[in-house]
């Protein structure tokens, strides 16, 4: 049987369900035209598309989710777009918490979630898919300034960003924490412990969250008159955190405190210190960021700034659903609270 041929299965004594061919005959168009309309294509002229929708409704033709949604012009699906490396996405517990929160909100809705891991979308296939009617809106997380395709996305769909973005336009929605304040809170903890030369392991400086946490680190140091140690990019990975800590230990001046901008990077950095016989926090105090499972999986419990990742995911999904419902009172920006969690590392 050809791939595009629909099997007809009917119980004895029952009228067979309408087929694509019957819809085409009723609308006076080809089978291919009907297929394009029910799959969300925009290449069919409006009068012909309307004739197909009318035939679908009259015959009760329901081939798939797209056909069921013709009346409302909605797919009942949303996309989670992560312009990120696959290994990093599945290796960072922060993303797991975000997805769990999104899923919890979608349980109380008719929407399903499509995961799109699109590292800069060089071929354009992500945009073709998202702009072709397959989803009604998108949630974007872990975005970089180089992800220019996202600007086109916001012109095609309602979009909620997990985190502020220089790419996002003024007509998008954002769920975030105050990362500047978070960086300052973490650094102030080190200052309060008596640290006098404080370094930082930052995330990629192509990400707004990294820049903001770095700004908070600088703000706290400047306010306290404490010397700044080196700034090293740890790429928000465990491997990057380990390499960054080695670089800090080889720096020309001794460092006695480090703000590490994610728990995952800290989980790579702490073993480097222990392997060199450096005591935590006596010789070097450490503060992380996230309060993910990584904060309690190292040999030294990690003092960290807790961001409510699961709740953030829930609110990202809730914001998008309300926008899709036409709720005009949805706030453009929702800032979630932060909290310092003190453990052994500081």
Image (spheres, rainbow, N blue to C red):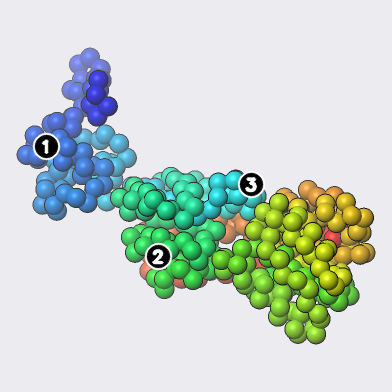
Residue at x-position 25% and y-position 20% = 1
Q: x, y percentage for residue 41?
A: 24, 47
**Circle 2 sits on which residue?**
151
User: How far is the residue under mark 2 from the one under mark 1?
Assistant: 36 Å
- Residue 249, above or below 22: below
Along the viewing direction, whichever of 35 and 260 lies nearer the viewer: 260
3 and 1 marks in contact (CB < 8 Å): no
Residue at x-position 55% and y-position 58% = 142
User: How far is the residue under mark 2 from the one under mark 3?
Assistant: 27 Å
User: How far is the residue under mark 3 from the one under mark 1?
Assistant: 48 Å
Along the viewing direction, whichever of 269 and 40 lies nearer the viewer: 269
Along the viewing direction, whichever of 331 and 257 lies nearer the viewer: 257
| Of callouts 2 and 1, the N-terminal one | 1
Which quadrant of the view contains residue 261? Answer: bottom right
2 and 3 marks in contact (CB < 8 Å): no
Residue at x-position 27% and y-position 27% = 3
**Circle 3 sits on which residue?**
91
Q: x, y percentage for residue 186?
A: 75, 70
Q: x, y percentage for residue 166?
A: 49, 71
**Circle 1 sits on which residue?**
30
- Left/right of residue 254 with respect to residue 203 in the rendered view: right
């Amino acid at each position: 049987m050809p791939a595009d041929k629909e099997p007809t299965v009917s119980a004895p004594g029952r009228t067979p369900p309408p087929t694509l061919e019957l819809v085409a005959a009723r609308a006076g168009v080809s089978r291919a035209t009907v297929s394009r309309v029910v799959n969300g294509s925009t290449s069919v002229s409006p009068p012909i598309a309307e004739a197909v929708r009318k035939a679908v409704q009259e015959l009760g033709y329901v081939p798939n989710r797209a056909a069921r949604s013709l009346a409302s012009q909605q797919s009942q699906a949303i996309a989670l777009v992560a312009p990120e490396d696959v290994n990093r996405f599945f290796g960072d517990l922060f993303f797991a918490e975000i997805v769990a929160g999104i899923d919890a909100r979608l349980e109380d809705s008719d929407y399903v979630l499509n995961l799109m891991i699109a590292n800069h979308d060089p071929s354009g296939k992500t945009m073709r898919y998202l702009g072709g009617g397959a989803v009604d809106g998108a949630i974007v997380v872990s975005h970089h300034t180089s992800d220019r395709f996202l600007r086109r996305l916001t012109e095609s769909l309602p979009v909620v960003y997990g985190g502020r973005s220089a790419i996002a336009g003024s007509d998008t929605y954002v769920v975030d924490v105050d990362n500047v304040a978070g960086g300052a809170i973490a650094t102030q903890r080190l200052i309060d412990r008596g640290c006098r030369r404080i370094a930082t392991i930052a995330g990629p400086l192509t990400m707004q969250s990294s820049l903001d946490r770095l700004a908070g680190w600088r703000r706290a140091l400047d306010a306290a008159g404490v010397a700044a140690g080196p700034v090293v990019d740890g790429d928000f990975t465990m491997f990057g955190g380990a390499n960054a800590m080695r670089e800090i230990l080889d720096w020309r001046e001794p460092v006695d405190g480090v703000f590490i901008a994610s728990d995952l990077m800290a989980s790579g950095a702490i073993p480097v210190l222990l392997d060199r016989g450096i005591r935590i926090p006596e010789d070097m105090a450490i503060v992380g960021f996230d309060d993910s499972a990584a904060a309690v999986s190292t040999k030294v419990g990690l003092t960290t700034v807790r961001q409510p990742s699961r709740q953030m995911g829930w609110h990202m999904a809730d914001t998008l659903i309300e926008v899709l419902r036409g709720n005009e009172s949805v706030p453009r920006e929702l800032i979630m609270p932060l909290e310092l969690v003190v453990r052994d590392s500081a």
